[in-house]
Amino acid sequence: MGWPLNFDLTHLIPIDIIIQMVFGWGKKKEPEYQAPQTEDVPLSEVQDKVSDLLELRKSQTISEFVAYRDHVLPLLEEISHIGRVLEEDNLNVDDVDKNIRVIVVRGKKQVIDVIKKDIVELPKISNIDDVILFQNVLNQILKKIGDALGRQTRVIHIFAKKYAAKLKEILAEVNSINADLKKLLENLENYTTLSSEITDYVEKISELKKFNSDAVGKISSLNDDLVACNENITSCEDSIKGVKSSSEYTELLKQKEMLSSLQLQRIRLNSRVLDQFTKISRPLGRYEYSSSLDKEQKSLLSGLIESPSKVLTAQNKDTILIIFENVKKGITSGSISVKDKTKALSQLEYVEKSLDGLILEISEQDSRQEKVNAMIIHLTPSELPLLEKDLDKTTYNKSVIESKIHSLESEMSENEKEIPYLIHDIEATLRRFSNTRYTIIGEN
């Protein structure tokens, strides 16, 4: 008992053809091939178009399920009828072996019980939830009956052969219908997935366009900031140039050059002083370890050994002379051991006699540097450090702004390149969704 339904959800079949195919009204004709229609659709209307197409698919699926339900109902009733007749039939087992008779009776009862219990009323169909419920119920019915007949296949085929053939025929048809229903649901699920994909593409395009729209505003604002930075840089540079072109600044440069020269002279002086004290560093060092000195003397003695020019001052002269006298006494008495006492004492005497000259030279050198430093401080324009700091800060801010603009413009360019690919994906997915070939048209 065949059922002349052959619905294909990949094409939108006119309703009059569906009615003819489902209910057999009118003359049944093979639908003539029609070339795919073309239609332009604005991007803003794509989601509504997809929603309408999906609703049409759902409506068509519901209609087909209703038609299949009407066909399945009498088939299930026929199975129930066979069960009732089978229940009254003793299958002529009175003359067979008692043990076999028990097996046959038990097997027949199991099949009849399943038919009675599991052939339930099929749900009515008015929406997609009903469609899914219907599919589940029919699946359950077929599984239960199939399992029961499978367990009792020998009993039914040997002792109820006339019932077995009819049950097999009906179940084959119901299973075929059930396979068609499953395919319908799979197709609908596929269309739902395609609908979601299209929605994702549209939302992605919307996000990219919004980003680009927002980026235009951000770039405009950043360009305003860039103009302000350039103006401030020009202002700072002009102000700095004005300061540096003054006679005071020229004098400042001369003083800085003089300071550099004095600093070089001081380095050379430090080196000469260190050379002299290096010659007496051994006895000074021995005296440091062999004598109990107060904190002031110990600090001064360490300075004479490590960096004498830093401690050679008029204030330290008397203490330095005391240290020298103590060292000479130590050398003479032998408490401070040296290789050559005469040479060591001679070198100490020489440095001692040079102290006044060295102290004066260091003092004068420091005094000259202090005067030049004071002049530099006096001549340095108070606004110059602020202008230079402002220039550095503005120059850095400018580079940051330029980097942001470049980044936004680069991302906007990438977005503009990606949008056509997304539109192509939408068109390709729509061709899988509908027989109509849609072209997405641009919008201002």
Image: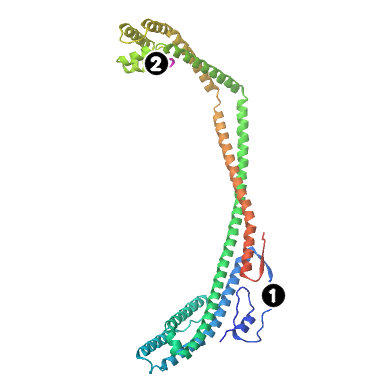
Q: Are marks 2 and 1 in contact (CB under 8 Å)?
A: no
Please name which of the two marks, 2 or 1, marks the residue nearer to the observer: 1
52 vs 382: above or below: below
Where residue 403 appears, as percent x and y from the top left, is: 59, 43
Give the extent of the magenta segment.
305-312
The quarter in which the N terminus is drawn is: bottom right
Amino acid type of the residue that numbered disc 1 sits on in the rendered structure: Gln
Q: Is residue 178 magenta?
A: no
Where residue 282 appears, as percent x and y from the top left, is: 38, 13
Residue 305, disc: 2
Mark 2 Cα shell of 10 Å, populated few (<14), some (14-19), many (≥20): some
Name the residue at 62% across, 44% down: 224
How far is the residue under mark 2 from the one under mark 1?
109 Å
Amino acid type of the residue that numbered disc 2 sits on in the rendered structure: Ile
Corner quadrant of residue 26? bottom right
34 vs 409: above or below: below
Mark 1 Cα shell of 10 Å, populated few (<14), some (14-19), many (≥20): few
Where residue 424 appears, as percent x and y from the top left, is: 64, 61
The quarter in which the C terminus is drawn is: bottom right
Where residue 300 appears, as percent x and y from the top left, is: 37, 16
Residue at the spot of label 1? 34
Q: Give the colouring mode of the picture.
A: rainbow
Dominant secondary-structure state across the stretch colored magenta: helix
Residue 393 visible: yes
Instruction: Out of 407 and 178, give the one closest to the viewer.
Output: 178
* Lower position in the chain sequence, tag 2 or tag 1: 1
Corner quadrant of residue 340? top left
326 vs 444: above or below: above
